[in-house]
Image (spheres, grey):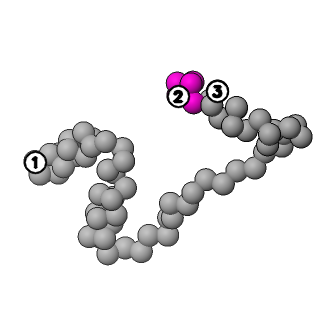
Amino acid sequence: MSVMREELHHLVDRLPEEKIAPLLRLVQDQLDEQQTVRDLPFIGMLEAEPDFAERAEEILRAEDNHPL
């Protein structure tokens, strides 16, 4: 592997996660390949007790206090 490739790998490893997607698109554009992968938002469903909607704000507040 060339010195420039090694340096690029090292720099990419140091980037914060939120800056990876734009850089990935830039590199993919340089390869002139069609990418079919799409970054779609997560959509979920759940089943819950009838009062779940009424307690939603309380539940979200409680979850905000938990570390990931």
Q: Secondary structure at mark 2?
A: loop
Q: Which residue is mark 2?
A: 68
> At x 57% / y 57%, what residue is drawn?
41
Q: Is label 2 or label 3 in front?
A: 3
* Type of the residue with mark 1: Val
Q: Are marks 1 and 3 in contact (CB under 8 Å)?
A: no
**Does 25 appear above or below 53?**
below
- Marks 1 and 2 sit apart, C-alpha to C-alpha, by 38 Å
> At x 89% / y 40%, what residue is drawn?
50
Residue with the most extreme top position: 66
**Does 26 appear above or below 68?**
below
**Left or right of residue 28: residue 63:** right
Q: Position of residue 6 (x, y in %)?
A: 17, 45
Q: Are marks 2 and 3 in contact (CB under 8 Å)?
A: no
What segment carries the magenta color?
Answer: 64-68
Q: Which residue is mark 1?
A: 3
- Marks 1 and 3 sit apart, C-alpha to C-alpha, by 50 Å
The numbered mark, 2 or 3, whose residue comes first in the sequence reads 3
Nearest the viewer among 7 and 68 is 68
Membership of 60 in magenta stretch: no
Question: Residue 62, which numbered label?
Answer: 3
**Left or right of residue 14: residue 59:** right
- Marks 2 and 3 sit apart, C-alpha to C-alpha, by 13 Å
Q: Secondary structure at mark 3?
A: helix
* Type of the residue with mark 2: Leu
